[in-house]
Amino acid sequence: MVALAASALSLLLSGQAQARDDDDHVRRASGHRTRVAAMAAPPAYEQECGACHVAYPPGLLPAASWQRLLGHLDKHFGVDASLDAAATRQITAYVESQAGTSRRVREEPAQDRITRSAWFVRKHGEVSARTWSLPAVKSASNCSACHAQAQQGDFNEHDVRIPR
């Protein structure tokens, strides 16, 4: 009985590992591989983080940046975004398990801001200051202003629509 349970668990885990391998990266039309979350975001992440901004895909920052951000929620970019201990643990476990590990996101950007990371600056270098200040955009951190699928973690540059 124990051997049967161990075999079933092994098959289940290997199937999950394979699904994760298949889901960790998606090749976009641009030819770039974009890391997507293999694990569903906990409701607390979507609810708490998504209340003020896009619940950014954890793969956009390295784990060290997420640790600092979640360790100082009382001073989250000028706002007290404190959470109860259970929600903080749940969100921390999620973002750390899904944090960026690719070459482009290993760096820890200034102030742990996605918009200050080298890859973000490179990808958005052609965006003018006037565009960032449009009422529909407001700032570089408002991804969904131009990326209609940002809530789903899709930032394909071929689907960008800059508001007027």
Image: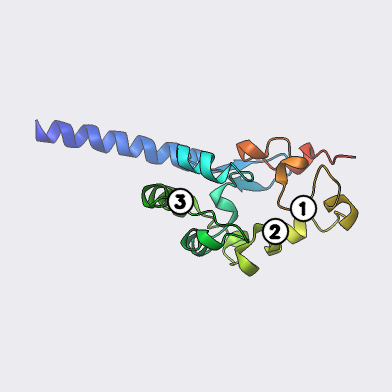
Q: Residue at x 53, y 58 (%)?
A: 101
Relative image position of residue 163 (x, y in whole percent): 86, 39
- According to the picture, the residue beneath numbered tag 3 turns out to be 83
Mark 3–mark 2 Cα distance, whole angstroms, equals: 24 Å
Screen quadrant of the C terminus: top right
Front of the two marks 1 and 2: 1
Q: Is residue 37 left or right of residue 112?
A: left
- Label 3: how many residues lie within 10 Å, few (<14), some (14-19) or many (20+)? some
* Residue type beneath disc 1: Ser
Screen quadrant of the N terminus: top left
- According to the picture, the residue beneath numbered tag 1 turns out to be 139
Tell whether label 2 touches label 1 (CB within 8 Å).
yes
| Up/down of 158 relative to 80, above or below | above
Q: Residue furthest front?
A: 80
Q: Earlier in the sequence, mark 1 or mark 3?
A: 3
Q: Nearer the viewer, residue 135 or 4?
A: 135
**Residue 115 got which mark?**
2
Residue 39 visible in image: no
